[in-house]
Structures are given as C-alpha cells and as structure tokens.
C-alpha cells in the first residue's frame, strides 16, 4: 500500500499570503489529522477530519482551516501568513476503530517557510 | 485528562550499548500507547504500540517497550544502539477513542561511534 503523501514538500511564502497544503491518506483510512511542528513548540495538533467532518480541533487561530473530501483526501489552508507560521506541517491518517485507538501513519510533511 | 512526560530531552549513548528512553503517562482510562521515531527532516514512523494486550511490546529495529501500569510508565529500550538509531523519539498516549493523540516533547537520541 502506498503511504501518506503530502504536497508540496517545500513551500516559501511571504507574510500576508495564504497557502493550501494537501494530504492523501493511505487507502481505506478515513481519519486524517494535521499537526504543526516547530523547534520551540514541538508537535501541536491542528485538527482531525473524519468522513468530511471536523471531529477534533486544536488550539489554533481561525486563520488555520481544513477540509476533507469524499475520497478522504484533505487540505489545510492558512490565511494571512505570519512569520511564526513557518513550520513543518505533518499529516497523518488512521483506521477508525470501534473499540480501540489505531495508530496514525504520518506523511513526510510540508516544510513551510514564511518570509 | 491524558498527558505524557518524556523524562529526558536528550540521551547520548555509545554505539553497541543499551538504549533507555523514559516515558511516563497520565490517563483516566486504559490507554493506548505508542512510540514514534523521527529522523531529521522526515515524518514520524511508528516503532511500536501497546493496546492492552501483552505488556511487553516488540517493535521494529530491535526496539521494545514495557507497559507498567503501577508505575504509569512506558519506557523504550534497545539492547544495542546503532548509529542509524540517532533520531528524535516521541512517546504518545490516547485514552479515549476518537480523541486527539497526545505527544510528549520528544527525546533526542545521539549515538557516539
């Protein structure tokens, strides 16, 4: 099975611009989560989508948004970029367990640099 | 509420010596626990998971972890470190289905030749 793929892998944007990142989960996985990773804050949870609905949301401003399509692919958008948004953005997918929490499988990430 | 504490931010070992990365968790329920590894500029890779079966869990690349409920610990070990083990390791807990995973702050493992 193909793993989680993320596009683009690298991105350079200017303050004030907006950006859209894409994630394709492993086939059959319906849950997609997004994380922001920075040296100072570590791994922080952004949001999770399941069956095209946002199921969980982290503590990020409204400039960060996402969506999930019927084929489980997901996008996240950051509007009005700030220098502090420079980070590695990771996407992860997992199966949906009736009784247990399944492990998440991570993509390689998108490295966003805001100048 | 669930939480996880990785007791060491950095561990340095010599090649061929044992590795011990410590993790303590807090959970109101029977937790699921995971260890992930991240090599520089890469995504996270699952090393192993505990989901209430055997308390000693074997993972990939010779790593294993033991779930100790009385100590609320899930330490990661490997008998003999290899240079390729140098990376960042994350301990992760989930105590309820469909809630976000909670990540520790990570332990950077350095392996000295």
Image: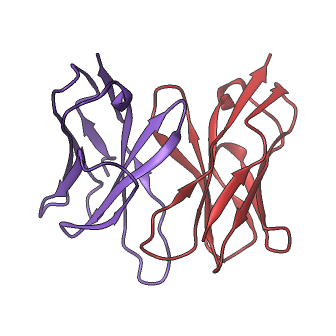
Chain colours: A purple, B red
Is residue A25 visible in the rendered image? The answer is: yes
Q: Residue furthest bottom?
A: A99
B68 left or right of A108 in image: right
Between residues B6 and A59, which one lies in front from this camera angle?
Answer: A59
B95 left or right of A44 in image: right
Q: Residue at x 23, y 44 (%)?
A: A63
Between residues B74 and B45, which one lies in front from this camera angle?
Answer: B74
A57 left or right of A11 in image: right
Between residues A107 and A55, which one lies in front from this camera angle?
Answer: A55
Q: Residue at x 41, y 83 (%)?
A: A98
Marks counted in the figure total 0
Q: Position of residue A97 (x, y in %)?
A: 41, 77
Q: Position of residue B45 (x, y in %)?
A: 51, 44
Q: Position of residue B53 (x, y in %)?
A: 67, 77
Q: Residue at x 23, y 30 (%)?
A: A8
B7 left or right of B84 in image: right
When the figure is inspected, residue A10 is found, relative to residue B88, above or below; the finding is above
Q: Quadrant of residue B111?
A: top right
């Amino acid at each position: 099975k193909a793993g989680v793929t993320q596009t683009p892998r690298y991105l350079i944007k200017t303050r004030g611009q907006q950006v859209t990142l894409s994630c394709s989960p492993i086939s059959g996985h319906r849950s997609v989560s997004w994380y922001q990773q920075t040296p100072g804050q570590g791994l922080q949870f952004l949001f999770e989508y399941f069956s095209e609905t946002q199921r969980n949301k982290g503590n990020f401003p409204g400039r960060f948004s996402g969506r999930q399509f019927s084929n489980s692919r997901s996008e996240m958008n950051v509007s009005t970029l700030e220098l502090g948004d420079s980070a590695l953005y990771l996407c992860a997918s997992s199966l949906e367990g009736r009784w247990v929490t399944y492990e998440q499988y991570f993509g390689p990430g998108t490295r966003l640099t805001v100048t | 509420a669930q939480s996880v504490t990785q007791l060491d931010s950095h561990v340095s070992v010599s090649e061929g010596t044992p590795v011990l990365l410590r993790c303590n968790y807090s959970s109101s329920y029977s937790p699921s626990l995971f260890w992930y590894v991240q090599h520089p500029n890469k995504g996270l890779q699952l090393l192993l998971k505990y989901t209430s079966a055997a308390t000693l869990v074997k993972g990939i690349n010779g790593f294993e972890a033991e779930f100790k409920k009385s100590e609320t610990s899930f330490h990661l070990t490997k008998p003999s470190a290899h240079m390729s083990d140098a990376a960042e390791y994350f301990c992760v807990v989930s105590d309820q289905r469909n809630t976000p995973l909670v990540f520790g702050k990570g332990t950077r493992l350095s392996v000295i030749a």
